[in-house]
Amino acid sequence: MSSSATRAAGNEAGNEAGNRAGNQAVNEAPNDEGRGPVREPVADSPLRRRAARLARPALAGLSGVLLYLSFPPRPLWWMAPLALALLGWCLYGRRARAGFGLGVLHGLGFLLPLLVWTGEGVGPVPWLALVTLESLLIGLTTLGIALVSRLPAWPLWGAAVWIAGEALRARVPFGGFSWGKLAFGQPDGVFLPLAALGGTPLLSFAVALCGFGLYEVLRVGADTRRATAALLAATAVAAPLAGALAARPLVSDAAEDGTVVAAVIQGNVPRAGFDFNAQRRQVLDNHANRTIRLAEDIKLGKVAKPDFVVWPENSSDIDPYAEPDAYAVIDNAVKTIGVPVAIGSVLAPETGPLRNTMILWDPVKGPVDTYDKRKIQPFGERIPMRSLVRLFSSDVDRVQRDFGPGKEPGVFDMAGSGVGMVTCYEAAFDDAVRSTVRAGAQVLAVPSNNATFGRTEMTYQQLAMDRVRAVEHSRTVLVPVTSGVSAVIRPDGEIVQQTKMFTADALVAEIPLRSTQTPATRFGPLAEYLLLAVAAAGLGWTLVRRMRRAS
């Protein structure tokens, strides 16, 4: 080979080596966050590239399904941090638009199965509309998480943004919809004591922080050059567990103010579904008869005589103030049992909205006190934008007259005990439960009517909320339900008695009276406000960094 040919071959080899080195230098240049090399993907087949593009959306939807599976009636609470870890992988380093879309997919995977009961008896339109709206709000949340994922210690900021999203969903639109809070899937979980410290916001935050921390541990844990990042990641996992252990002494079922014997009545309904409203007299008779039967069992010595009795929501949909026959049926049952009874009724004044009311009925004096439900369920007990909604579903006309909200918490003096009323849907709202305890409730009662939703998981989801509330405020929670599941829950969240669904039954239990207020009861939304401030700080920091890079 000639010398010129040799030089040409050498130049070509050198150029090729230089190109390889240059490409490697470009592909392994530190990214704008100083987090080490960003490796460009090697060109591959179109099929593999398409599969890679679909991986994150598919896994975002899967993370939602895993989160759903962590909720009762399945005791799989530990799947929630795993679901959030997978979601963290999907969101980490993504742009805002991608974060929004991935969050919507996560929301659909989570809420479509979780809220399927909302379509029971009325078809899929309300269910799909609610899930879509809530998933869009989750998308806004994950948009924020994607933005803060570029910050140091991002699991902290991301978990705080998640709480901001839950706070938003609990308030808007139409007064909010709190179903699906991370906290409500944790009645059997190790994080539960944190509810007594900072309420459901702190409990949800612990789950989210642990989940995002798990992903961060996997992401940086193997890189020995990033010891600080690995330490922060491990702290994000360990801190919620340590906090829950430290909060454990706040959980107690000691009888500070003595004990009482309480009874809850489940009268059952003739048939499930919305038609139960057409069976109002039969439902009332069922609850009256089951109360009379309980009185007979007491006389026979089968059960202890209760100090008071609680009926479910809608146990008398006939207004006893307007219908003498209904008044007589209730009065006879109360006189037979011989103790105060809280009756769930619907009051229909001549003018104005209907009232979903609990009536305190004394065996001697008759009705002596009332509590009007304050949180009225939109599209269930009232129809916002009725004329517009009717275009999509004629089922809105099932609610011909809207219910109106009460204004004050209700605590009944029942045989010397303060029994706080939190009617059904209200159990999902932090302020409704806390205000009742602050008003003097030594025991909480959550009278509910789940007959509309048949044998769906709705009743178990609500029972899980009640268990979390028991620990949050350190109170026994009595849950009388028309068709089940009725239950007695101790202040430590343990269910000590419960009924089967669609079975007439009565539960009688000795329960502790408590007056101590947990930090969650005393300080209320303070923990949520602090976490909202952390979320705002994280988003603000992200904005400042972007502005600096743009300048």
Image (cartoon, rainbow, N blue to C red):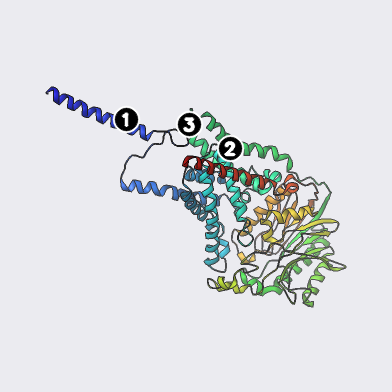
Residue 459 rendering spot, x and y as whole percentages: 63, 59
Give the Cα separation between the discs numbered 3 and 2.
17 Å
Q: Residues within 10 Å of mark 3 (few under 14, many from 20)?
A: few
Q: Which residue is disc 3 drawn over?
A: 222
Q: Which mark is residue 21?
A: 1
Residue 508 rendering spot, x and y as whole percentages: 77, 57
Amino acid at dot 2: Ala
Q: Quadrant of residue 359?
A: bottom right
Residue 49 rendering spot, x and y as whole percentages: 35, 46
Q: Residues within 10 Å of mark 1 (few under 14, many from 20)?
A: few
Q: Tell me the element at label 2.
A: helix
Give the Cα separation between the discs numbered 2 and 1.
39 Å
The reply to whether the C-beta atoms of the residues labelled 1 and 3 are less than 8 Å apart is no
Amino acid at dot 3: Ala
Amino acid at dot 1: Ala
Q: Is residue 97 above or below residue 325?
A: above
Q: Which mark is residue 236?
A: 2
> From where the camera sits, is residue 305 visible?
no
The mark closer to the camera, 2 or 1, is 1
Give the Cα separation between the discs numbered 1 and 3.
26 Å
Q: Residue at x 67, y 43 (%)?
A: 194
Q: Which mark is residue 434?
A: none
Q: Residue at x 66, y 72 (%)?
A: 277
**Pointer 3 or 2: first along the chain:** 3
**Pointer 1 or 3: first along the chain:** 1
> From where the camera sits, is residue 97 visible?
yes
Q: Residue at x 58, y 47 (%)?
A: 161
Q: Tell me the element at label 1.
A: helix
Residue closest to the far left? 2
